[in-house]
Amino acid sequence: MSAWATYPYAGTVVLVTGAGTGIGRGIARAFLEQGASVALVGRTEASLREAASGFEDALVLVTDLTQKGAADAVVSAVARRFGRLDVVIANAGTSEASPVDTFDDAAWERLRSINLDSVLRLVGAAVGPLRETRGNIVAISSVAGLRGEWGMYAYGATKAAVSVAVQGVALDLGRDGVRVNAIAPAFTVSRLTQERLDDTEFTDRLLDRVALGRVATPDDIARVALFVASPDAAYLTGAVIPVDGGTSASNGTPRPIA
């Protein structure tokens, strides 16, 4: 990825969860390209090492953040390697359908533990080091947490919880100089979404909802993360920023036929 802007992130330590694929991979590599030291956190070592390839100042941490104590262990590992922590990108997440008639407790547990619980634990583990550096947190939410989505109400509920949690934590940490924001992407190219994007009928219908007429790439989200985490966004906190090509600008009316 090549960002249009250049940020002097050398000397900055960034922790990115879910860094092996998709949006997390794009964000991790974007910060590495801008000179940051980056801890790439995820469950699959091979994908994390691929994401970190070509960069010396990258730390690969293989862990499952849904496990109690994992977030504390990750933050401690970052402190041992780099001596500080400036930015936390809470990106790790998953998605699955939630049919009203058949959705069960096990599916809810999977969604909640990955999309919400791991974020809250990571924030709790990182707040001490971030107070020391007056750093910031960027959580990856979703436009599905801002509006309803067909067949995805449980996923949307977890992302809505992330967005509101971000706002509350921003209030609690503002006096400490710690900023807390969220980015809310719409449908983005990733391993999780590729099967649906391969369905041309679905993709055509999806693009009819997007003002810019294309599906987002991880780099689209990463470029916004670079700005939100930077001192240029020093007065931005408690914000949930849609990065969705205009998806959430619509009231649902179909695009006019040309």
Image (spheres, rainbow, N blue to C red):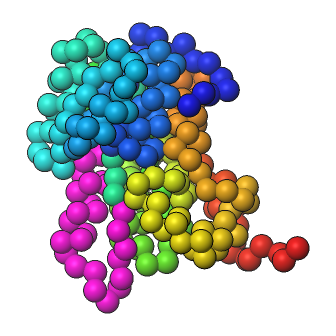
Q: Is residue 101 magenta?
A: yes
Q: How far from the left and from the top, in percent, is residue 233?
A: 58, 28
Say if 13 sits above or below 15 in the image.
above
Q: Is residue 157 left or right of residue 6?
A: left
Seen as rendered, the residue at the extreme right is 258
State the residue at coordinates (38%, 44%).
Answer: 21
Query: Residue most toward the bottom?
Result: 101
Check residue 180 for magenta coloring. no
The number of discs equals 0
Of residues 98 and 4, which is closer to you in this image?
4
Q: Is residue 30 visible?
A: yes
Rendering coords of residue 133 (x, y %): 36, 16
Relative to 96, is 72 on the left or the right? left
Q: Main secondary structure of the magenta part?
A: helix
Q: Is residue 169 visible?
A: no
Q: Residue at x 70, y 70 (%)?
A: 208
Residue in the picture at 31% in, 39% down:
47
Judging depth in this view, the residue of 247 and 197 nearest the camera is 197
Residue 49, quarter of the rendered image: top left
Point out residue 247 in the picture as x, y percentages from the top left corner: 65, 61
Residue sitting at x 31%, y 89%: 101
Image quarter hosting the N terminus: top right
Check the image and report above or below for 193 versus 221: below
Q: Which residues are magenta?
A: 95-121
Q: Quadrant of the C terminus?
A: bottom right
Q: Nearer the viewer, residue 10 or 2?
A: 2
120 vs 100, nearest the viewer: 100
In the image, residue 9 lies at what x, y percent? 49, 15
